[in-house]
Amino acid sequence: MFEFVRKHNKFLQVVLFLLIFPSFVLFGIQGYNHFTDDSNLAAKVAGIPISREQLDEAQRQQVARLEQALGPNADARALDTPQMRMRTLDSLVREVLLQVAVSKQHLSVSDTALQQAILQIPQIASLRDKNGNFDVQAYRKLIEAQGMTTAQFEASVRSQLLQQQALGGIGENAMGSRDIARQLVDWRTQTRSVRVAHFDAADFTKDVHPDDAQVEAYYKAHPDQFQVPEKATVQYVVLGIGDLANQVQVTPAQEQAYYDSHRAEFNTAAQRRASHILIALPAKATPQQVAAAKAKADEIAAELRKNPASFAELARKDSQDPGTAPSGGDLGWFTPDAMVKPVADAVFAMHKVGDIAGPVRSQFGFHIVELTGIRPAENKTLAQAKAQIDDALRTQGASKLFSAESDKFSSLVYEDSRSFDKVAKLLHLQVYTANDVTPEPLSGDPKFNPLASPAFLQALFGKLSVRDRRNIPAVQVAPSTLASGRIVSYQPAATLSFEQARTRARALLVQQLAAQQAVKAGEQALAQARAGKQQPAWGPVQQVSLAQAESAPVPPQVVNAVFRANASKLPQLVGVALPGQGYDLVSVDAVSHAKPSAEELRAQEGTLNQILGEAYVQAYVDALKKQYGVKILYKPRSDTAG
């Protein structure tokens, strides 16, 4: 498994992306051709239109993926910005361009090649029953869990394979300089000793006393800082699979039939959790390299026999697996067929948590392994699986109902356009009311709250909706989820009067003027220090590195300035204005160089080659844009996400 990843890394990045994150576009060029009205278009690529609806859906998927990755702290408003929408549109344009190139070059992928490519994906290759036969049902379930049909998934893989052909290996052979890689590693790993004299804007506010004329002039010069956005009280209803699932009745006979036809779902294979320490070997190791690695592994194993509790510490220190060493060598939970065989054999031969085995040799080197968890195989009875079966059957039933009920929903919100009473009564839905709603999407999943959907809010705050106060047409806010809303009361965007904004305007002006004085004082101190006349009140010596820039004791702007300073003659004095905060005067006193390992150099060369490869691919895409023609019609609003 690991060896395949090594050999097919670029291919797997594409295919696993498809498996985990469905592509923006899951259809061929012909799928674009039903959009003809330019007013509804985001772009045209070789005459092929990309609609605003496609852009909205692609952006919604992108935000949903980011929210899932970032977890509960994700802010949808920060994720769905005009800049992000333009990047999403660029991805759509690029995809269509490559599809055009595929069509123009008459490229094709045979069914056999497609099947082989799909079966090489580890998650799919492992879907075999105890007799070694491919489990088609498990394959369908795996794909459906990603929100796709097997036909859509296979079309996506075929499309990506065709696009790889169109790229023709561009970028795969990019080679960066080893000297540049060495300089980049040194730049990233070196540490610079600095002292900082901080001139804080807050210390100068007591000396700033603007008069009313200055405050009013500031107010007039910065009207955007005193805006009150449009807002409304709204009502809305949502029709989703969950609402319909509650209406589906499940019988014992259906439960038994589902259990009988899905027994494999309720049988869980035995799993083990383990940690390992890897002493790596190159692909074609010499006998001397093997002997040296074996000796090192034996030494670690002997140390662990004396002190088993030190396993995690030794893994972090000595393991040459960069993916697991930081976590103490943790490999997570796995079944025997999901791990390198020598490691799996050693782990599943141990009997109790805490046992240590090895060294065992695999194609990657020598492993010392520790058993850290045991999960026995589990076979659920019908009674144990009843809740899971009922949920599945209700979801299936709701999916069948949704098509018909969604038509009813769309018709009812249109026919009775000034109330949701009728649609709520007939479809057993709840009518929600929300106050102070703005065009800015809320954080969260639109599936549960349509006010987190940019498309829903765009329709809700449309000119006709604001003017007529009628129900908007049903909007798909998430897969199998429709919503309609109506503005009950509306307050347009406005600028606060000077009297209303006077206090805020004064505070902002004082902050601005104090920051300017802090910068002026800092610049004067810098000039005196450089002239050798007077040194400022330096703070303590601090260590700064680019590798730890996010946790550095100084702001990012200061870190950047420190590493732009010429280190050939120290100390170096640099000054950095911090907008709204003041000024930092910095003395760069010393530089410490770390000695890069061969592994770090190889990793940096790989990153450099990847950057060059991406640049080659982008140059090719830019050439395709000129060859086939791209017209961007979408103009993002600067004040909203859409």
Image: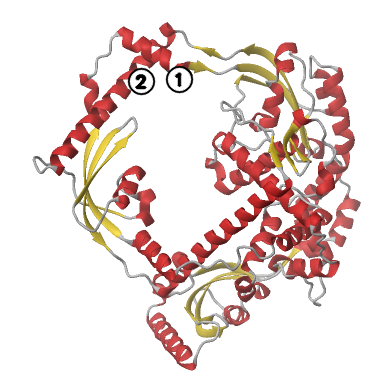
Q: CA distance from mark 2 to mark 1?
A: 9 Å
The tag earlier along the polypeptide, 2 or 1, is 1
Can residue 81 be seen by looking at this rendering?
no
247 lies left or right of 7: right
Can residue 387 be seen by looking at this rendering?
yes
- Vertical position of residue 431 compared to residue 303: above or below: above
* Residue denoted by label 2: 508
Q: Residue at x 78, y 57 (%)?
A: 102
Percent across and percent down for residue 507 are 34, 18
26 lies left or right of 172: right
Q: Name the amino acid, label 1.
A: Gln
Q: Residue at x 74, y 33 (%)?
A: 41
- Disc 2 and disc 1 in contact, CB within 8 angstroms: yes
- The image quadrant that residue 342 belongs to is bottom right
Local secondary structure at mark 1: helix
Percent across and percent down for residue 362 are 57, 83
* Residue denoted by label 1: 225
- The image quadrant that residue 464 belongs to is top right
Q: Residue at x 32, y 24 (%)?
A: 512
